[in-house]
Image (cartoon, rainbow, N blue to C red):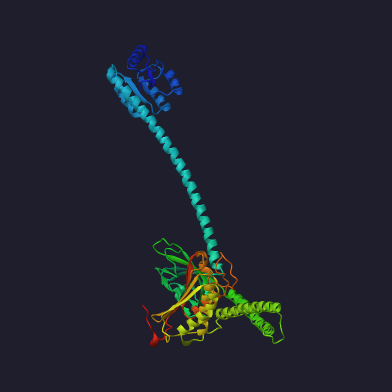
Amino acid sequence: MNGSLIVLVDDEKIVTSAFKTLLKVEGYNNVVCFNDPKEAVEYLKANTPDIIVSDFLMPEMNGLQFLTEAKKIHPEVSTIMLTGYADKENAIKAINEIGLYKYIEKPWDNEDLLINVRNGIERSHLLSSLREKISELEEAKKQLEVYSNDLEKLVAQRTQELQLANNKLSGIINYCADGILILDKDGSISQVNPACENMTGLSEAALINKKFQEIAYITTRQGNRSFENKDGGIFGLNKDTNDVLVKDCIITNKLGGAETPVEIHFASINPDGESEKYVGVIRDISSHKETERLRDDFIATLTHDLRTPLLAAIQTLKFFLDGSLGEVEEKQAVLLSTMLQSNEDLLGLVNALLEVYRFDSGKLKLCKTVFPVRDLVTRCYDELKPLADKKDIKFTLSTDIPDDLEITADKSEIKRVIINLCGNAVNYTNKGGEVEIIAKAQSGDFIFSVVDNGNGIPAEDIPKLFNRFSQGTTKRRSTGTGLGLYLSRQIIEAHGGKIWIDSKLNKGSEFTFLLTDVVNEERQVVNG
Protein backbone atom coordinates (compact mmCIF):
# COMPACT_ATOMS: atom_id res chain seq x y z
CA MET A 1 0.00 0.00 0.00
CA ASN A 2 2.82 2.48 0.95
CA GLY A 3 4.36 2.01 -2.48
CA SER A 4 1.22 3.32 -4.15
CA LEU A 5 1.58 6.20 -6.63
CA ILE A 6 -0.34 9.30 -5.51
CA VAL A 7 -0.80 12.27 -7.88
CA LEU A 8 -1.57 15.61 -6.17
CA VAL A 9 -2.60 18.75 -8.15
CA ASP A 10 -2.95 22.21 -6.54
CA ASP A 11 -1.92 25.61 -7.84
CA GLU A 12 -0.53 26.58 -4.42
CA LYS A 13 2.90 25.11 -3.67
CA ILE A 14 2.43 25.41 0.06
CA VAL A 15 -0.59 23.09 -0.16
CA THR A 16 1.22 20.46 -2.23
CA SER A 17 4.24 20.64 0.05
CA ALA A 18 2.15 20.20 3.19
CA PHE A 19 0.14 17.42 1.63
CA LYS A 20 3.26 15.56 0.51
CA THR A 21 4.83 15.91 3.95
CA LEU A 22 1.72 14.54 5.62
CA LEU A 23 1.62 11.54 3.32
CA LYS A 24 5.33 10.91 3.69
CA VAL A 25 4.96 10.82 7.47
CA GLU A 26 2.33 8.10 6.98
CA GLY A 27 4.71 6.10 4.80
CA TYR A 28 3.54 7.14 1.33
CA ASN A 29 6.87 7.80 -0.40
CA ASN A 30 5.68 7.80 -3.99
CA VAL A 31 3.80 11.15 -4.14
CA VAL A 32 4.01 13.27 -7.30
CA CYS A 33 2.83 16.89 -7.00
CA PHE A 34 1.81 19.31 -9.75
CA ASN A 35 0.93 23.01 -9.53
CA ASP A 36 -0.16 23.09 -13.18
CA PRO A 37 -3.05 20.74 -14.04
CA LYS A 38 -2.01 20.59 -17.71
CA GLU A 39 1.38 19.16 -16.73
CA ALA A 40 -0.44 16.64 -14.58
CA VAL A 41 -2.57 15.55 -17.57
CA GLU A 42 0.58 14.88 -19.62
CA TYR A 43 2.08 12.91 -16.76
CA LEU A 44 -1.03 10.76 -16.43
CA LYS A 45 -0.82 9.84 -20.10
CA ALA A 46 2.41 7.95 -19.38
CA ASN A 47 1.82 6.78 -15.79
CA THR A 48 -0.94 5.01 -13.88
CA PRO A 49 -1.49 6.32 -10.35
CA ASP A 50 -3.35 4.56 -7.56
CA ILE A 51 -5.26 7.74 -6.58
CA ILE A 52 -5.58 11.36 -7.86
CA VAL A 53 -6.15 14.32 -5.47
CA SER A 54 -6.98 17.68 -7.01
CA ASP A 55 -7.92 21.17 -5.86
CA PHE A 56 -11.07 22.68 -7.36
CA LEU A 57 -10.14 26.29 -7.91
CA MET A 58 -7.14 26.56 -10.24
CA PRO A 59 -6.44 29.41 -12.75
CA GLU A 60 -6.03 27.73 -16.13
CA MET A 61 -8.06 24.48 -15.56
CA ASN A 62 -10.34 23.95 -12.60
CA GLY A 63 -10.50 20.66 -10.72
CA LEU A 64 -13.68 19.55 -12.44
CA GLN A 65 -12.09 19.89 -15.89
CA PHE A 66 -8.84 18.26 -14.80
CA LEU A 67 -10.51 15.27 -13.18
CA THR A 68 -12.72 14.85 -16.26
CA GLU A 69 -9.58 14.49 -18.39
CA ALA A 70 -8.00 12.21 -15.80
CA LYS A 71 -11.06 9.95 -15.82
CA LYS A 72 -10.80 9.61 -19.59
CA ILE A 73 -7.23 8.37 -19.22
CA HIS A 74 -7.68 6.18 -16.12
CA PRO A 75 -11.38 5.44 -15.53
CA GLU A 76 -10.79 2.99 -12.64
CA VAL A 77 -8.53 5.29 -10.57
CA SER A 78 -10.20 6.86 -7.52
CA THR A 79 -10.36 10.68 -7.49
CA ILE A 80 -10.64 13.08 -4.52
CA MET A 81 -11.43 16.80 -4.84
CA LEU A 82 -10.34 19.43 -2.29
CA THR A 83 -12.96 22.16 -2.05
CA GLY A 84 -13.89 25.13 0.04
CA TYR A 85 -17.25 25.25 1.75
CA ALA A 86 -18.63 27.54 -0.99
CA ASP A 87 -17.67 25.01 -3.67
CA LYS A 88 -19.61 22.11 -2.16
CA GLU A 89 -22.26 22.38 -4.86
CA ASN A 90 -19.60 22.00 -7.58
CA ALA A 91 -18.15 19.01 -5.75
CA ILE A 92 -21.52 17.29 -5.71
CA LYS A 93 -21.84 18.07 -9.42
CA ALA A 94 -18.45 16.43 -9.99
CA ILE A 95 -19.59 13.33 -8.14
CA ASN A 96 -22.60 13.01 -10.43
CA GLU A 97 -20.86 13.91 -13.71
CA ILE A 98 -17.45 12.30 -13.54
CA GLY A 99 -17.88 9.73 -10.79
CA LEU A 100 -15.84 11.51 -8.16
CA TYR A 101 -14.92 9.17 -5.32
CA LYS A 102 -14.80 11.79 -2.51
CA TYR A 103 -14.66 15.52 -1.86
CA ILE A 104 -12.91 16.96 1.18
CA GLU A 105 -13.62 20.43 2.47
CA LYS A 106 -10.80 22.76 3.36
CA PRO A 107 -9.40 22.97 5.89
CA TRP A 108 -9.31 19.17 6.09
CA ASP A 109 -8.87 16.91 9.01
CA ASN A 110 -5.60 14.99 8.56
CA GLU A 111 -6.98 11.74 9.95
CA ASP A 112 -10.02 11.94 7.75
CA LEU A 113 -7.86 12.79 4.74
CA LEU A 114 -5.58 9.81 5.33
CA ILE A 115 -8.53 7.44 5.73
CA ASN A 116 -10.05 8.64 2.44
CA VAL A 117 -6.71 8.33 0.65
CA ARG A 118 -6.21 4.82 1.95
CA ASN A 119 -9.76 3.78 1.07
CA GLY A 120 -9.45 5.41 -2.36
CA ILE A 121 -6.26 3.49 -3.11
CA GLU A 122 -7.92 0.25 -2.05
CA ARG A 123 -10.91 1.09 -4.26
CA SER A 124 -8.62 1.72 -7.22
CA HIS A 125 -6.99 -1.66 -6.68
CA LEU A 126 -10.36 -3.40 -6.43
CA LEU A 127 -11.66 -1.71 -9.57
CA SER A 128 -8.46 -2.60 -11.41
CA SER A 129 -8.72 -6.23 -10.26
CA LEU A 130 -12.37 -6.29 -11.26
CA ARG A 131 -11.48 -4.95 -14.67
CA GLU A 132 -8.88 -7.68 -15.09
CA LYS A 133 -11.40 -10.33 -14.08
CA ILE A 134 -13.92 -8.92 -16.50
CA SER A 135 -11.29 -9.03 -19.25
CA GLU A 136 -10.45 -12.59 -18.36
CA LEU A 137 -14.11 -13.52 -18.42
CA GLU A 138 -14.57 -11.86 -21.79
CA GLU A 139 -11.54 -13.73 -23.13
CA ALA A 140 -12.85 -16.96 -21.67
CA LYS A 141 -16.21 -16.25 -23.27
CA LYS A 142 -14.52 -15.79 -26.63
CA GLN A 143 -12.62 -19.05 -26.15
CA LEU A 144 -15.83 -20.79 -25.13
CA GLU A 145 -17.51 -19.54 -28.28
CA VAL A 146 -14.60 -20.87 -30.31
CA TYR A 147 -14.81 -24.24 -28.52
CA SER A 148 -18.56 -24.30 -28.98
CA ASN A 149 -18.19 -23.67 -32.69
CA ASP A 150 -15.47 -26.33 -32.92
CA LEU A 151 -17.63 -28.75 -30.95
CA GLU A 152 -20.57 -28.18 -33.26
CA LYS A 153 -18.32 -28.84 -36.23
CA LEU A 154 -16.92 -31.97 -34.55
CA VAL A 155 -20.40 -33.23 -33.69
CA ALA A 156 -21.53 -32.59 -37.25
CA GLN A 157 -18.47 -34.41 -38.58
CA ARG A 158 -18.95 -37.38 -36.23
CA THR A 159 -22.65 -37.49 -37.05
CA GLN A 160 -21.80 -37.62 -40.74
CA GLU A 161 -19.25 -40.37 -40.13
CA LEU A 162 -21.77 -42.36 -38.09
CA GLN A 163 -24.34 -41.89 -40.82
CA LEU A 164 -21.88 -43.16 -43.43
CA ALA A 165 -20.97 -46.12 -41.21
CA ASN A 166 -24.66 -46.84 -40.62
CA ASN A 167 -25.34 -46.67 -44.36
CA LYS A 168 -22.47 -49.08 -45.00
CA LEU A 169 -23.70 -51.44 -42.28
CA SER A 170 -27.25 -51.25 -43.62
CA GLY A 171 -25.92 -52.00 -47.09
CA ILE A 172 -23.96 -55.00 -45.82
CA ILE A 173 -26.97 -56.35 -43.92
CA ASN A 174 -29.49 -55.73 -46.68
CA TYR A 175 -27.34 -57.13 -49.49
CA CYS A 176 -25.70 -59.93 -47.49
CA ALA A 177 -26.31 -63.39 -48.96
CA ASP A 178 -26.60 -64.82 -45.44
CA GLY A 179 -29.80 -64.43 -43.49
CA ILE A 180 -29.50 -62.14 -40.46
CA LEU A 181 -32.04 -61.80 -37.66
CA ILE A 182 -32.27 -60.31 -34.17
CA LEU A 183 -33.90 -62.32 -31.38
CA ASP A 184 -34.76 -61.71 -27.75
CA LYS A 185 -33.94 -64.22 -25.03
CA ASP A 186 -37.12 -66.28 -25.53
CA GLY A 187 -36.49 -66.63 -29.29
CA SER A 188 -38.93 -63.99 -30.58
CA ILE A 189 -37.81 -62.32 -33.82
CA SER A 190 -37.49 -58.53 -33.73
CA GLN A 191 -35.62 -57.78 -36.99
CA VAL A 192 -34.59 -59.61 -40.18
CA ASN A 193 -32.79 -58.81 -43.43
CA PRO A 194 -34.04 -59.49 -46.99
CA ALA A 195 -32.01 -62.73 -47.29
CA CYS A 196 -33.84 -64.10 -44.25
CA GLU A 197 -37.15 -63.11 -45.82
CA ASN A 198 -36.20 -65.03 -48.99
CA MET A 199 -35.23 -68.14 -47.01
CA THR A 200 -38.47 -68.24 -45.01
CA GLY A 201 -40.82 -66.96 -47.70
CA LEU A 202 -42.23 -64.45 -45.22
CA SER A 203 -41.97 -60.67 -45.06
CA GLU A 204 -40.33 -58.89 -42.16
CA ALA A 205 -43.74 -57.79 -40.89
CA ALA A 206 -44.90 -61.42 -40.81
CA LEU A 207 -41.72 -62.57 -39.06
CA ILE A 208 -41.71 -59.94 -36.31
CA ASN A 209 -42.67 -61.45 -32.92
CA LYS A 210 -42.76 -64.95 -34.44
CA LYS A 211 -40.78 -67.57 -32.54
CA PHE A 212 -37.63 -68.71 -34.29
CA GLN A 213 -38.65 -72.27 -33.46
CA GLU A 214 -41.55 -71.85 -35.88
CA ILE A 215 -39.33 -71.48 -38.94
CA ALA A 216 -36.31 -73.68 -38.11
CA TYR A 217 -35.51 -77.04 -36.57
CA ILE A 218 -32.50 -79.30 -35.98
CA THR A 219 -32.15 -82.61 -37.85
CA THR A 220 -31.01 -85.77 -36.07
CA ARG A 221 -31.06 -89.46 -36.84
CA GLN A 222 -34.08 -89.77 -34.57
CA GLY A 223 -35.93 -87.16 -36.62
CA ASN A 224 -36.45 -83.43 -36.45
CA ARG A 225 -36.57 -81.52 -33.20
CA SER A 226 -37.14 -77.86 -32.44
CA PHE A 227 -34.80 -75.46 -30.70
CA GLU A 228 -35.16 -75.24 -26.94
CA ASN A 229 -34.33 -72.52 -24.45
CA LYS A 230 -31.56 -73.31 -21.98
CA ASP A 231 -30.34 -71.57 -18.82
CA GLY A 232 -32.44 -68.48 -19.41
CA GLY A 233 -31.00 -68.03 -22.90
CA ILE A 234 -31.55 -69.60 -26.30
CA PHE A 235 -29.73 -72.36 -28.20
CA GLY A 236 -27.22 -72.92 -25.41
CA LEU A 237 -26.34 -69.22 -25.02
CA ASN A 238 -26.04 -67.97 -21.45
CA LYS A 239 -23.91 -65.68 -19.31
CA ASP A 240 -20.89 -67.97 -19.72
CA THR A 241 -21.08 -68.38 -23.52
CA ASN A 242 -21.38 -65.39 -25.83
CA ASP A 243 -21.69 -67.28 -29.12
CA VAL A 244 -22.53 -70.74 -30.44
CA LEU A 245 -22.58 -72.43 -33.85
CA VAL A 246 -25.58 -74.68 -34.55
CA LYS A 247 -25.20 -77.21 -37.36
CA ASP A 248 -27.60 -79.63 -39.06
CA CYS A 249 -30.44 -77.09 -39.16
CA ILE A 250 -33.30 -76.74 -41.58
CA ILE A 251 -35.11 -73.50 -42.50
CA THR A 252 -38.59 -74.08 -43.89
CA ASN A 253 -39.97 -71.82 -46.60
CA LYS A 254 -43.59 -71.15 -45.70
CA LEU A 255 -44.39 -69.97 -49.23
CA GLY A 256 -43.12 -72.89 -51.32
CA GLY A 257 -42.56 -75.52 -48.67
CA ALA A 258 -38.86 -75.91 -49.57
CA GLU A 259 -36.41 -76.87 -46.84
CA THR A 260 -32.94 -75.30 -46.84
CA PRO A 261 -30.04 -76.90 -44.95
CA VAL A 262 -28.24 -74.17 -42.97
CA GLU A 263 -25.68 -73.47 -40.28
CA ILE A 264 -26.56 -70.75 -37.78
CA HIS A 265 -24.08 -68.72 -35.75
CA PHE A 266 -25.74 -67.12 -32.72
CA ALA A 267 -24.01 -64.39 -30.71
CA SER A 268 -25.11 -62.31 -27.74
CA ILE A 269 -25.35 -58.58 -28.52
CA ASN A 270 -25.45 -57.37 -24.91
CA PRO A 271 -24.86 -60.33 -22.57
CA ASP A 272 -24.49 -58.04 -19.54
CA GLY A 273 -27.56 -55.92 -20.28
CA GLU A 274 -30.98 -56.28 -18.72
CA SER A 275 -32.69 -56.84 -22.08
CA GLU A 276 -30.72 -59.64 -23.75
CA LYS A 277 -30.63 -59.69 -27.53
CA TYR A 278 -29.05 -62.18 -29.91
CA VAL A 279 -28.01 -61.94 -33.53
CA GLY A 280 -28.24 -65.02 -35.72
CA VAL A 281 -26.38 -65.37 -39.02
CA ILE A 282 -27.97 -68.07 -41.20
CA ARG A 283 -25.76 -69.54 -43.93
CA ASP A 284 -27.24 -71.65 -46.72
CA ILE A 285 -25.05 -74.77 -47.04
CA SER A 286 -27.02 -76.47 -49.82
CA SER A 287 -24.07 -76.35 -52.22
CA HIS A 288 -21.74 -77.58 -49.47
CA LYS A 289 -24.09 -80.48 -48.72
CA GLU A 290 -24.25 -81.32 -52.42
CA THR A 291 -20.45 -81.28 -52.65
CA GLU A 292 -20.25 -83.57 -49.61
CA ARG A 293 -22.80 -85.90 -51.18
CA LEU A 294 -20.88 -86.06 -54.46
CA ARG A 295 -17.64 -86.71 -52.58
CA ASP A 296 -19.18 -89.44 -50.46
CA ASP A 297 -20.81 -90.99 -53.53
CA PHE A 298 -17.44 -91.00 -55.26
CA ILE A 299 -15.74 -92.63 -52.25
CA ALA A 300 -18.56 -95.14 -51.92
CA THR A 301 -18.40 -96.05 -55.62
CA LEU A 302 -14.62 -96.31 -55.53
CA THR A 303 -14.53 -98.46 -52.39
CA HIS A 304 -17.35 -100.62 -53.66
CA ASP A 305 -15.50 -101.25 -56.93
CA LEU A 306 -12.34 -102.07 -54.96
CA ARG A 307 -14.03 -104.91 -53.10
CA THR A 308 -14.30 -107.21 -56.13
CA PRO A 309 -10.58 -107.28 -57.05
CA LEU A 310 -9.66 -107.43 -53.34
CA LEU A 311 -11.91 -110.44 -52.76
CA ALA A 312 -10.49 -112.10 -55.87
CA ALA A 313 -6.92 -111.48 -54.73
CA ILE A 314 -7.68 -112.77 -51.22
CA GLN A 315 -9.31 -115.93 -52.55
CA THR A 316 -6.40 -116.53 -54.96
CA LEU A 317 -3.87 -116.16 -52.15
CA LYS A 318 -5.87 -118.60 -50.04
CA PHE A 319 -5.78 -121.09 -52.93
CA PHE A 320 -2.00 -120.80 -53.00
CA LEU A 321 -1.67 -121.19 -49.23
CA ASP A 322 -4.01 -124.20 -48.89
CA GLY A 323 -2.18 -126.04 -51.69
CA SER A 324 -5.05 -126.01 -54.15
CA LEU A 325 -2.70 -124.72 -56.86
CA GLY A 326 0.24 -126.91 -55.95
CA GLU A 327 2.85 -127.17 -53.26
CA VAL A 328 4.32 -123.91 -51.94
CA GLU A 329 7.74 -123.54 -50.36
CA GLU A 330 8.05 -122.22 -46.81
CA LYS A 331 9.52 -118.86 -47.87
CA GLN A 332 6.79 -118.48 -50.47
CA ALA A 333 4.13 -119.29 -47.86
CA VAL A 334 5.43 -116.60 -45.52
CA LEU A 335 5.36 -114.02 -48.32
CA LEU A 336 1.89 -115.09 -49.45
CA SER A 337 0.58 -114.95 -45.85
CA THR A 338 1.88 -111.39 -45.53
CA MET A 339 0.18 -110.46 -48.80
CA LEU A 340 -3.04 -112.12 -47.62
CA GLN A 341 -2.99 -110.18 -44.34
CA SER A 342 -2.38 -106.88 -46.16
CA ASN A 343 -5.25 -107.50 -48.57
CA GLU A 344 -7.58 -108.47 -45.72
CA ASP A 345 -6.62 -105.25 -43.86
CA LEU A 346 -7.32 -103.23 -46.99
CA LEU A 347 -10.67 -105.00 -47.39
CA GLY A 348 -11.47 -104.09 -43.78
CA LEU A 349 -10.75 -100.43 -44.55
CA VAL A 350 -12.92 -100.57 -47.68
CA ASN A 351 -15.78 -102.15 -45.71
CA ALA A 352 -15.42 -99.53 -42.94
CA LEU A 353 -15.57 -96.71 -45.49
CA LEU A 354 -18.70 -98.23 -47.01
CA GLU A 355 -20.32 -98.54 -43.57
CA VAL A 356 -19.50 -94.92 -42.73
CA TYR A 357 -20.94 -93.77 -46.05
CA ARG A 358 -24.13 -95.73 -45.50
CA PHE A 359 -24.62 -94.30 -42.01
CA ASP A 360 -23.84 -90.73 -43.09
CA SER A 361 -26.17 -90.91 -46.08
CA GLY A 362 -28.93 -92.59 -44.11
CA LYS A 363 -28.96 -95.53 -46.52
CA LEU A 364 -28.09 -98.10 -43.88
CA LYS A 365 -31.18 -99.02 -41.88
CA LEU A 366 -30.92 -100.72 -38.52
CA CYS A 367 -32.25 -104.23 -38.38
CA LYS A 368 -33.44 -104.46 -34.81
CA THR A 369 -34.18 -107.81 -33.24
CA VAL A 370 -34.74 -109.14 -29.73
CA PHE A 371 -31.76 -111.13 -28.43
CA PRO A 372 -30.10 -112.09 -25.12
CA VAL A 373 -27.45 -109.46 -24.55
CA ARG A 374 -25.30 -111.47 -22.11
CA ASP A 375 -24.70 -114.08 -24.80
CA LEU A 376 -23.57 -111.36 -27.26
CA VAL A 377 -21.14 -109.78 -24.76
CA THR A 378 -19.71 -113.20 -23.82
CA ARG A 379 -19.10 -114.16 -27.45
CA CYS A 380 -17.28 -110.84 -28.08
CA TYR A 381 -15.19 -111.51 -24.98
CA ASP A 382 -14.31 -115.00 -26.18
CA GLU A 383 -13.24 -113.70 -29.61
CA LEU A 384 -10.82 -111.19 -28.13
CA LYS A 385 -9.49 -113.35 -25.28
CA PRO A 386 -6.73 -115.00 -27.40
CA LEU A 387 -5.44 -111.56 -28.49
CA ALA A 388 -5.31 -110.43 -24.85
CA ASP A 389 -3.57 -113.65 -23.77
CA LYS A 390 -0.96 -113.14 -26.48
CA LYS A 391 -0.02 -109.80 -24.85
CA ASP A 392 -0.24 -111.29 -21.34
CA ILE A 393 -3.12 -108.90 -20.54
CA LYS A 394 -5.49 -109.67 -17.66
CA PHE A 395 -8.78 -109.70 -19.58
CA THR A 396 -11.94 -109.96 -17.43
CA LEU A 397 -15.68 -109.79 -17.91
CA SER A 398 -17.90 -108.42 -15.12
CA THR A 399 -21.67 -108.64 -15.51
CA ASP A 400 -24.68 -109.62 -13.45
CA ILE A 401 -27.08 -109.61 -16.40
CA PRO A 402 -29.29 -112.75 -16.35
CA ASP A 403 -28.82 -115.19 -19.22
CA ASP A 404 -32.39 -114.69 -20.41
CA LEU A 405 -32.46 -110.86 -20.30
CA GLU A 406 -33.13 -109.57 -23.80
CA ILE A 407 -32.75 -106.20 -25.46
CA THR A 408 -34.07 -104.79 -28.72
CA ALA A 409 -31.29 -103.54 -31.03
CA ASP A 410 -29.36 -104.31 -34.20
CA LYS A 411 -27.32 -107.26 -32.96
CA SER A 412 -24.62 -107.19 -35.62
CA GLU A 413 -24.05 -103.43 -35.29
CA ILE A 414 -23.88 -103.55 -31.48
CA LYS A 415 -21.41 -106.42 -31.78
CA ARG A 416 -19.32 -104.25 -34.13
CA VAL A 417 -19.20 -101.52 -31.48
CA ILE A 418 -18.30 -103.90 -28.64
CA ILE A 419 -15.55 -105.59 -30.70
CA ASN A 420 -14.15 -102.21 -31.72
CA LEU A 421 -14.07 -100.76 -28.18
CA CYS A 422 -12.62 -103.91 -26.62
CA GLY A 423 -10.16 -104.43 -29.47
CA ASN A 424 -8.87 -100.86 -29.07
CA ALA A 425 -8.47 -101.41 -25.33
CA VAL A 426 -6.41 -104.57 -25.88
CA ASN A 427 -4.34 -102.98 -28.68
CA TYR A 428 -3.48 -99.84 -26.71
CA THR A 429 -2.85 -101.52 -23.35
CA ASN A 430 0.77 -102.36 -22.64
CA LYS A 431 1.94 -105.94 -22.19
CA GLY A 432 0.99 -107.24 -18.77
CA GLY A 433 -1.78 -104.65 -18.35
CA GLU A 434 -5.44 -105.05 -17.45
CA VAL A 435 -8.68 -104.70 -19.43
CA GLU A 436 -12.10 -105.15 -17.86
CA ILE A 437 -15.45 -105.42 -19.64
CA ILE A 438 -18.46 -104.26 -17.62
CA ALA A 439 -22.03 -104.85 -18.81
CA LYS A 440 -25.22 -104.15 -16.89
CA ALA A 441 -28.93 -103.47 -17.31
CA GLN A 442 -30.48 -100.73 -15.23
CA SER A 443 -33.92 -99.11 -15.31
CA GLY A 444 -34.60 -100.38 -18.81
CA ASP A 445 -31.21 -99.23 -20.16
CA PHE A 446 -28.21 -101.27 -21.30
CA ILE A 447 -24.83 -99.90 -20.22
CA PHE A 448 -21.54 -101.24 -21.57
CA SER A 449 -18.06 -100.13 -20.50
CA VAL A 450 -14.52 -101.25 -21.20
CA VAL A 451 -11.82 -100.11 -18.77
CA ASP A 452 -8.05 -100.35 -19.30
CA ASN A 453 -4.91 -99.19 -17.50
CA GLY A 454 -3.10 -98.18 -20.67
CA ASN A 455 -1.39 -94.91 -21.53
CA GLY A 456 -4.59 -92.86 -21.53
CA ILE A 457 -5.54 -90.05 -23.88
CA PRO A 458 -4.53 -86.36 -23.51
CA ALA A 459 -7.42 -84.06 -22.60
CA GLU A 460 -6.93 -81.95 -25.74
CA ASP A 461 -7.45 -85.02 -27.97
CA ILE A 462 -10.66 -86.30 -26.34
CA PRO A 463 -13.12 -83.87 -28.06
CA LYS A 464 -12.03 -85.05 -31.54
CA LEU A 465 -11.68 -88.74 -30.63
CA PHE A 466 -14.99 -89.78 -32.22
CA ASN A 467 -14.42 -87.73 -35.39
CA ARG A 468 -13.88 -89.32 -38.76
CA PHE A 469 -10.27 -90.46 -39.42
CA SER A 470 -9.22 -89.53 -35.89
CA GLN A 471 -5.99 -91.29 -34.91
CA GLY A 472 -6.82 -91.30 -31.22
CA THR A 473 -3.93 -89.32 -29.77
CA THR A 474 -1.33 -86.97 -31.14
CA LYS A 475 1.20 -88.45 -28.68
CA ARG A 476 1.34 -91.74 -30.55
CA ARG A 477 0.34 -92.44 -34.14
CA SER A 478 -2.09 -95.27 -34.75
CA THR A 479 -1.94 -97.75 -37.59
CA GLY A 480 -5.75 -97.97 -37.66
CA THR A 481 -8.11 -96.35 -40.14
CA GLY A 482 -9.43 -93.75 -37.72
CA LEU A 483 -12.97 -94.87 -38.58
CA GLY A 484 -13.71 -97.35 -35.79
CA LEU A 485 -14.75 -94.92 -33.06
CA TYR A 486 -16.50 -92.64 -35.58
CA LEU A 487 -18.54 -95.59 -36.86
CA SER A 488 -19.23 -96.70 -33.28
CA ARG A 489 -20.62 -93.27 -32.45
CA GLN A 490 -22.78 -93.34 -35.58
CA ILE A 491 -24.19 -96.76 -34.64
CA ILE A 492 -24.92 -95.88 -31.01
CA GLU A 493 -26.50 -92.53 -31.94
CA ALA A 494 -28.59 -94.29 -34.61
CA HIS A 495 -29.98 -96.38 -31.74
CA GLY A 496 -30.78 -93.17 -29.85
CA GLY A 497 -27.98 -93.81 -27.36
CA LYS A 498 -24.82 -92.03 -26.21
CA ILE A 499 -21.14 -92.92 -26.22
CA TRP A 500 -18.36 -91.20 -24.27
CA ILE A 501 -14.92 -91.60 -22.75
CA ASP A 502 -13.26 -90.86 -19.40
CA SER A 503 -9.49 -90.92 -19.62
CA LYS A 504 -6.45 -89.81 -17.64
CA LEU A 505 -2.99 -89.67 -19.11
CA ASN A 506 -0.73 -92.54 -17.98
CA LYS A 507 -3.59 -94.04 -15.93
CA GLY A 508 -5.95 -95.50 -18.49
CA SER A 509 -9.29 -94.99 -20.23
CA GLU A 510 -12.92 -96.01 -19.88
CA PHE A 511 -15.16 -96.12 -22.96
CA THR A 512 -18.90 -96.35 -22.26
CA PHE A 513 -22.04 -96.48 -24.34
CA LEU A 514 -25.64 -96.31 -23.18
CA LEU A 515 -28.73 -97.65 -24.96
CA THR A 516 -31.91 -96.29 -23.38
CA ASP A 517 -35.19 -98.18 -23.06
CA VAL A 518 -33.95 -101.27 -24.92
CA VAL A 519 -34.48 -103.92 -22.20
CA ASN A 520 -37.66 -105.93 -22.73
CA GLU A 521 -40.09 -104.96 -19.96
CA GLU A 522 -41.18 -108.48 -19.11
CA ARG A 523 -37.58 -109.51 -18.44
CA GLN A 524 -36.18 -106.27 -17.14
CA VAL A 525 -33.96 -106.57 -14.06
CA VAL A 526 -33.11 -103.47 -12.06
CA ASN A 527 -29.63 -103.65 -10.55
CA GLY A 528 -28.92 -101.38 -7.62
| Image position, residue 380 (x, y; %) | 51, 81
Task: Please count the marks in the image.
Answer: 0
Pick the residue in front: 57 or 17.
Answer: 17
| Image position, residue 171 (x, y; %) | 55, 64
- Furthest residue in direction front, as rendered: 330
Pick the residue in front: 146 or 382.
Answer: 382
Horizontal side, residue 193 vs residue 329: left or right: left
Pick the residue in front: 506 or 81.
Answer: 506
Pick the residue in front: 59 or 416.
Answer: 416
To which quarter of the image does residue 43 belong?
A: top left
Q: Quadrant of the C terminus?
A: bottom left
**Any part of residue 267 in sight:** no
Residue 371, above or below 61: below
| Image position, residue 125 (x, y; %) | 37, 28
Horizontal side, residue 109 vs residue 353: left or right: left
**Any part of residue 501 in sight:** yes
In the image, what residue occupies the spot 44% across and 67% down?
A: 237
Q: Quadrant of the N terminus?
A: top left
Horizontal side, residue 108 vs residue 344: left or right: left
| Image position, residue 406 (x, y; %) | 43, 86
In the image, what residue occupies the spot 40% across and 26% down?
A: 71
